[in-house]
Structure formats: structure tokens, C-alpha cells
Amino acid sequence: MLLENKGIKTDTFYIPPFDLNVGEIVVLNLFQGAHFYETEMLIREILCGRIPNENVIIHQNLTFAEHFFESKIRSFFYPVTVGEYLKKNANPDSPYATKIYETEWINKKTKVNTLAGNPRKSLSLYATLSKTENIVFDLRGQDPQGAKETYTIVKAVVKNGGSAILLDGFNEMKNDCTKYIEIQWKKN
């Protein structure tokens, strides 16, 4: 068991109990809406162990597949390239460190800020997977095809001994995961 959630309670929501084991994908549906981003950030911090919660026991660390961010000044004067990003964020000994180059038009000199949502997410996902096979991820910034591709990549990692928690806003993966959990909103 990598993670044990005995039920996360706040003033506004409740997440029912679940466990995460090797070889499992848990889909946690937060439902879309104005609350989504703030709720996702709080839950990811709890699941990755950055914010302690008495009802969450982490037996093995999980890593969130971070979104790429670059300051406006940096992006204008000296934008980050794919090669620079991977050098800083990926384990060079992993096959995932160079997986992004399988996209024929992406190379080491491609500026990350020119990538659309799908390849940008793939870049950060591959960098994360080069360091760990136990992740928390989302599909924000991706179109439906890109979301499906990301999920397929993660499923392959999980099948080979990894584990994952998807923080999602929809129920499309409900029948394509090990466990499906829905957040319960408290009524005011």
C-alpha cells in the first residue's frame, strides 16, 4: 500500500476513504466548476505529503506532474528550451527523459512556451515519470485527444508496477480505472 486515505474532510467537502496500491489508478472526480482549481491544489498538496492530514497515511511518496510555468520576462528574453527543461527536471538515465523527442517536430532547441497544451503536458509528464512511477496528475490544459493520450501513457506505467491518482473534473475515466472516487460537497 502506497497511500491510505481514511476520509479527507474540510469545511466544504469530503473525500471518501480509498487506498492506493502498486498497479492501481485512482480517479478522483472533483467535478468542474469555480472551485476546481483551488480544491485540486489543496488535494494534491495533501496526497503528495506537503500538507499533513491526520486521515491520510503516505507509505511511499507520490509526485505531482507539475505544469510548466515561465515568467513573462524570461519567456520574452530567454525562453526555456525543451533540452534545458529536461536537463533541469528529468533523470537523464531514464528512457522517459528523451521520450518527448519521439514527436518529430520537437527537439532540444524547441521553446517550451511555443508548445500547445498536449505536448507541454507530455513534456512535464515524461520528466516526472523519469524520476518516479508513482504520480498524481491532472489533465488541465489538454484537449480530449491529448487527455486520452496522457491517460494511456500513465496506464502503461501503472501496468508495469507504477501507481497513479488522477485529479479530474469529469467521469469519463470512471470505467477505465482501478478505483473511482467522487468528492462530496457539503451544503451550506
Image (cartoon, rainbow, N blue to C red):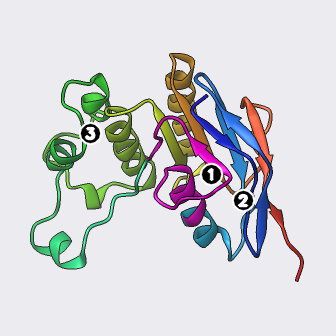
User: Mark 1 or 3, which is nearer the eye?
Assistant: 1
Q: Is residue 107 left or right of residue 168?
A: left
Q: Which residue is mark 2?
A: 30
Quarter of the C terminus within the rendering: bottom right
Q: Quadrant of residue 39?
A: bottom right
Q: Which residue is mark 3?
A: 105
Image marks 2 and 1: residues in contact by CB distance under 8 Å: yes
107 over 98 or under it: above or below: below
Task: In this rendered view, identify the residue nearer to me: 141 or 16.
Answer: 16
Q: Residue at x 72, y 65 (%)?
A: 32
Q: Which residues are magenta?
A: 42-64
Q: Residue at x 56, y 57 (%)?
A: 46
Task: In this rendered view, identify the residue nearer to me: 144 or 20.
Answer: 20
| Residue 37: x %, y % from top left | 59, 69
- List the single residue furthest toward the bottom: 188
Q: Residue at x 43, y 48 (%)?
A: 65
Indicate the amino acid at tag 3.
Trp
Task: In this rendered view, identify the residue nearer to me: 176 or 11.
Answer: 11
- Residue 42's disc is none
5 over 74 or under it: above or below: above
SS label for mark 3: loop
Q: Which residue is mark 1?
A: 167
Indicate the amino acid at tag 1.
Leu
Q: Disc 2 versus disc 1: distance between alpha carbons?
A: 7 Å
Q: Earlier in the sequence, mark 1 or mark 3?
A: 3
SS label for mark 2: loop
SS label for mark 1: strand
